[in-house]
Image (cartoon, helix red, strand yellow):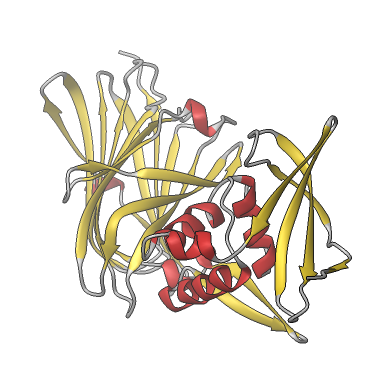
Amino acid sequence: MNYCCVVGSVKEEGICPMCMRPSLITRKWVLNNYGKRYNYIVYKHREGAHYSNESPQYSRSLRKGTLKKILIDTINSESFKDGLFSTEDARISLMRTNQSVDMDSVRDNLYQLVELGMLKSVKKGRRVYFINAAYSDRLSFVDDSLRVILKDVDDDALFKRHASIATVRNDKGWPLYYLPYKIFGDSGIKFSELQFKALDITNKVELKTVVIEDNPTEKRLLLKLIKPLFPGERIRIRFEYDWGEPNQSFFHTAATYMRSFNLTFLGNGPLEARATQSLSNLNEVRDLSKSIKLGKRHGWNYVYTLRLRSIEPFSVIQFRWKRIEE
């Protein structure tokens, strides 16, 4: 039986499945006498090359839903580039982690992720591209209530310990697998230095955090839920991190309507505290300073609390303070 060799495709880098070393990849294919196509990969090394057949067998051997989960993790990983990508781009990224899958399986699962709201499809000419929906309203949700606590753990009025407890509700018509969050700070810091932790209080499990952007003063994150949050369902989330406030100012922007918002500062020194609420729909700034309550709590001599109800979307709540020398 004769085979007709057809010229290979674009060269790329990947992990050789034979020796598990990084290598230059060349994809090739051949036709037999019956016109059936067989794909194979050449992994080139300095001392020679390894060959690997490429077929749908691996994809069929995966349990139902496994490839979809692998794709979700791959697309939302820090190494995956933002912007439009093709089926081949996703497949190449899978190959870097030694996941040899066929194009049809990758394409089918990408379209399933479009249905779930994880991706959007964009047609340019005859080609179809995909884009991560992490920044779109497909992954948005409603914070029914939010409680933010800042602790002055170093007694320097920087209140670096931040904790947020939110009751999250899915108000969309599709399940959510991730929750997008942004956190900001006055000083430049790497995400790895924040000691960030996220917890699903409802299911009592720690959540995996995917870092989308790690800018010096802004972090864009995805919290991976342990199970899908279906339409109408609620979940309680807690996350905390350490990030000092040298400008002695903290603000929160309400992306959606909130039933309640509580802000608490725990310290052991008196503060001159002020608070404002900016209302985008009324182009108005309200002074909330007189609504700040002062009290005590176990271990903390000065506890400043601001409690608000019925927060309108895009309202900006800002709390400013200055340490009063005793």
Q: Is residue 308 visible?
A: no
User: Which image quadrant is residue 205 in?
Assistant: top left
Q: Quadrant of the C terminus?
A: top left
Q: Is residue 187 visible?
A: yes
Residue 293 lies, with reference to residue 5, above or below; the image says: above
| Residue at the image point whose x is 40% and y is 67% from the top | 140
Q: Hey, which residue is sitting farthest right in the picture?
A: 7
Picture mark count: 0
Question: Observer-nearest residue: 194 or 134?
Answer: 134
Residue 204 horizontal side relative to residue 185, left or right: left
Q: Hey, which residue is sitting farthest front in the picture?
A: 1
Question: Observer-nearest residue: 115 or 295?
Answer: 115
Q: Position of residue 197 (x, y in %)?
A: 35, 35
| Residue at the image point whose x is 27% and y is 65% from the top | 229
Q: Position of residue 193 (x, y in %)?
A: 49, 26
Q: Position of residue 316 (x, y in %)?
A: 42, 57
Question: Observer-nearest residue: 124 or 13?
Answer: 13
User: Which image quadrant is residue 101 in?
Assistant: bottom right
Residue 320 horizontal side relative to residue 71, left or right: left
| Residue at the image point whose x is 51% and y is 59% from the top | 58
User: Which image quadrant is residue 298 in?
Assistant: top left
Residue 91 horizontal side relative to residue 151, left or right: right
Residue 263 lies, with reference to residue 244, above or below; the image says: below
